[in-house]
Image (cartoon, grey):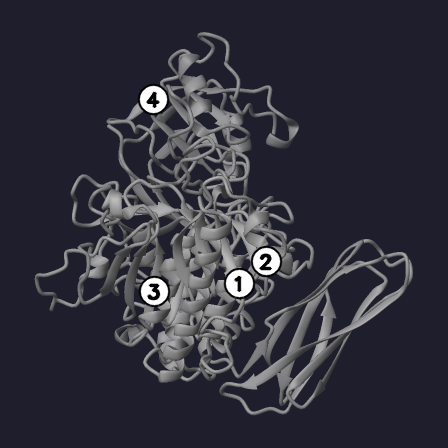
């Protein structure tokens, strides 16, 4: 019997990419999430600033756009007239092109169905500033609550009694696959009345943002699972009971901001795998107009250079006082793997680290037991004993354990439990190859540090039917030594709680950004083995459905929920100040490497400012803008000096402030020198002629009265 655990978690073997995607290989594929642009459509920016940044309509710090004011109405009319001028120009110069969407809040733009019209033609219109093919975006898959313990959330609430007010009065827009409002996470208020089946007193709004929905008529309901999982991490009701695979979770699950309200802005309705730029723009602008304080965008796609139009819209939303948390993408571990709109300078961009827990059965062999994570593959229906068959002939980097990506000799695993390695191909392919060689079950050894994770089906036409599980990398050598020994897989599942916390996820994308080499992600958050809600449609109608997911998608709602908690406590803080409170108070020297789980990471292009600490964020003294500094590419052939500034603003502190810098990169020839004048910090970077090529970085520390009150990453890339 197949047991559901992580429906959307993909078997991205080498890089652990648990991204939901059904393009370019589908679930379980090692390829990326699919095409990154839609060449049949365009997003076209027009002359004139949008409401969020126009000098007469942009909100004051800590305020929102006043859509009822005559000034706003008048300017919207002007922008509408400009869009009409563009439509008239299209009728005269590009008759086949059709406007399919219009925007004026975060971006003054229109969406255009090209129907053969070139971008060059659109760019020739006198009122056009920029035209680009629409991006295609995908959901980024997937005692005391351990997630909350890692980020000190309950301490930030003021103890468990503070759950009733954690995030109260704050609205968080979930721009995702939908929310199941009937899940216990989202129906805790008890005062819901009949009416809209997609909303209640917790989920205030529900809509579909799909450019073809007039024909498709999809509903906002989550039939996918990704959106409900994200929403649960943001604001699941405090202390909600959970059962996974028949195992009672030994703590009550809670969202980071359990008192916050949610909005269901569904850009991936039904089984639609991708959203165009205009779909996300429509959702973002509607959320802004409805007064949402925070948006969660656990999605990503390809970027168009330094910054594309959707990223610009995210920046504008921040300036309109909405904190926008965005996934960094799941294309790591290498540099330059960030996606859009996570590249946006003013996005709160999340990288993913581990939470040390999972659910699964035990494997007993050689007098030892090993915890295994179950996923979408079959599981044994009774205790199963067979000889352990270790498949060797793999690369040295995997200890010689075979990845089983090619066909194995017929009968070589007859009636055995196969031991194979994660890597290169999909889980489905390697397990199918083990089954074809005669194996009655398969155990896949993880190839990155930390706990085993739930494996997902997908990517091949002939899916395997034997039971399959994952064990941790730390167990590899011991299990390989038991080749040929009798091993038993237990039927009974159990909850495992380990010390494998704060390990950087191998799939987590890292900076720098293209061309300008900005620091991204901004901060790390729990994103591996995160337990949260699933819609009833996933679990055959069960009212309380749960799953462990992994991905930067799962890290992002920790940041969105944190932003809701901070904003609830300090409603007058601007979005930029809330963002800084989270980023510039993160715990340093905490996140370790995915390769060994022990080496502490200091490179800000991998971990941002560190792993978030919500308790520190709600006690922030000073805000920094920007939240990090990058001096970009520095030529190594000649000496180079440049200065950049950070503006300070008081939160709960009053200064005066001092600044020091500690370099952590170890490379020579580049120095960073800070100086403070009032509420401005100036950092001067000096590179000597012939400075060592590579990344140079360190930590700028802001102090008041000798005590540290904030820190920021400083970076330069010598080329």
Query: Is disc 3 placed on a helix, strand or loop?
Result: helix
Image quadrant assignment for residue 343: bottom right
**Is there CB contact under 8 Å for labels 1 and 2?**
yes
Depth check, mark 4 against mark 1: the one in front is: 1
Q: Earlier in the sequence, mark 4 or mark 1?
A: 1
Relative horizontal placement of residue 658, taking residue 96 as reference (left or right): right
Q: How many marks?
A: 4
Depth check: give the residue in front, 4 or 114.
Answer: 114
Which x, y percent locates residue 287?
Answer: 34, 66
Q: Residue furthest top?
A: 410
Query: Is disc 2 placed on a helix, strand or loop?
Result: loop
Residue 706 makes an appearance in the image:
yes
Image quadrant assignment for residue 199: bottom left
**Is there CB contact under 8 Å for labels 3 and 1?**
no
* Quadrant for the N terminus in the image: top left
Q: In the rendered image of this protein, does residue 391 appear above or below residue 704?
A: above
Residue assigned mark 1:
312
Residue assigned mark 3:
286
Q: CA distance from mark 3 to mark 1?
A: 16 Å
Q: Earlier in the sequence, mark 4 or mark 3?
A: 3
Residue depicted at 31% across the width and 23% down the height: 384
Residue assigned mark 4:
466
Disc ID at residue 307: 2
**Is there CB contact under 8 Å for labels 3 and 2?**
no
Mark 2 surroundings within 10 Å by alpha-carbon count, few (fewer than 14), some (14 through 19), many (20 or more): some
Depth check, mark 2 against mark 4: the one in front is: 2
């Amino acid at each position: 019997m197949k047991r559901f655990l992580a429906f959307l978690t993909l078997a991205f073997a080498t890089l652990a990419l648990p991204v939901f995607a059904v393009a370019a290989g589908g679930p379980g594929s090692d390829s990326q999430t699919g095409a990154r642009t839609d060449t049949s459509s365009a997003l076209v920016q027009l002359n004139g600033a949008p409401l969020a940044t126009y000098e007469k309509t942009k909100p004051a710090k800590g305020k929102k756009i006043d859509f009822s004011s005559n000034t706003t109405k008048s300017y919207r009319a002007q922008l509408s007239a400009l869009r009409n001028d563009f439509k008239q120009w299209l009728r005269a110069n590009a008759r086949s092109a059709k406007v399919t969407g219009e925007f004026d809040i975060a971006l003054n733009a229109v969406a255009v169905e090209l129907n053969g019209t070139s971008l060059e033609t659109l760019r020739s219109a006198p009122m056009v500033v920029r035209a680009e093919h629409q991006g295609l975006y995908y959901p980024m898959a997937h005692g005391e609550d351990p997630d909350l313990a890692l980020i000190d959330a309950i301490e930030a609430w003021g103890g468990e009694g503070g759950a009733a007010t954690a995030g109260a009065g704050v609205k968080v827009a979930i721009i995702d696959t939908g929310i199941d409002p009937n899940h216990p996470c989202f129906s805790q208020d008890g005062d819901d009345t009949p009416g809209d089946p997609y909303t209640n007193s917790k989920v205030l709004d529900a809509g579909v943002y799909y450019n073809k929905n007039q024909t498709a008529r999809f509903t906002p309901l989550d039939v996918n699972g990704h959106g409900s999982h994200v929403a649960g991490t943001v604001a699941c009701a405090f202390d909600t009971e959970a059962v996974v695979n028949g195992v009672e979770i030994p703590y009550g699950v809670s969202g980071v901001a359990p008192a916050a309200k949610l909005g269901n802005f569904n850009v991936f309705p039904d089984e639609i795998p991708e959203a165009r730029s205009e779909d996300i723009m429509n959702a973002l602008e509607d959320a802004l107009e409805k007064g949402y304080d925070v948006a969660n965008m656990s999605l990503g796609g390809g970027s168009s250079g330094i910054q594309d139009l959707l990223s610009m819209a995210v920046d504008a939303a921040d300036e309109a006082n909405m904190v926008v948390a965005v996934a960094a993408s799941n294309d790591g571990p290498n540099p330059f793997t960030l996606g859009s709109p996570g590249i946006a300078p003013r996005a709160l961009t999340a990288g993913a680290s581990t939470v040390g827990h999972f659910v699964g059965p035990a494997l007993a062999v050689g007098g030892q037991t090993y915890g295994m994570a179950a996923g979408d593959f079959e599981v044994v229906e009774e205790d199963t004993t067979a000889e352990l068959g270790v498949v060797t002939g793999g690369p040295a980097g995997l200890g010689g354990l075979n990845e089983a990506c090619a066909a194995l000799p017929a009968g070589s695993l007859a009636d055995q439990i196969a031991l194979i390695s994660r890597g290169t191909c999909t889980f489905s392919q390697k397990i199918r190859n083990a089954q074809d060689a005669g194996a009655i079950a398969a155990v896949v050894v993880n190839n990155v540090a930390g706990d085993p994770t739930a494996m997902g089906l997908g990517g091949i036409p002939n899916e395997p039917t034997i039971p399959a599980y994952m064990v941790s990398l730390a167990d590899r050598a011991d299990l390989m030594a038991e080749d040929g020994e009798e091993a038993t897989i237990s039927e009974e599942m159990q909850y495992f709680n380990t010390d494998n916390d704060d390990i950087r996820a191998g799939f987590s994308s890292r900076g720098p950004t293209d061309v300008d080499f900005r620091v991204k992600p901004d901060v790390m958050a729990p994103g591996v083995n995160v337990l949260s809600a699933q819609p009833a449609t996933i679990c055959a109608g069960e009212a309380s459905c749960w799953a462990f997911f992994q991905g930067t998608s799962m890290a992002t709602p920790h940041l969105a929920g944190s932003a809701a908690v901070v904003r609830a406590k300090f409603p007058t803080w601007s979005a930029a100040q809330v963002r800084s409170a989270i980023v510039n108070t993160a715990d340093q020297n905490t996140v370790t490497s995915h390769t060994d789980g022990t080496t502490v990471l200091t490179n800000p292009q991998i971990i941002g400012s560190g792993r978030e600490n919500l308790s520190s964020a709600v006690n922030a003294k000073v805000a920094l803008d920007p939240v990090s500094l990058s001096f970009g590419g520095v030529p190594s052939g000649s000496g180079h000096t440049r200065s950049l500034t950070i503006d300070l603003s008081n939160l709960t502190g009053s200064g005066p402030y001092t600044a020091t810098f500690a370099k952590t990169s170890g490379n020579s020839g580049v120095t960073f020198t800070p100086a403070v004048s009032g509420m401005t910090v100036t950092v001067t970077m000096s590179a000597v002629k012939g400075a060592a090529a590579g990344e140079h970085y360190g930590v700028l520390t802001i102090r008041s009265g000798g005590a540290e009150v904030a820190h920021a990453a400083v970076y330069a890339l010598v080329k």
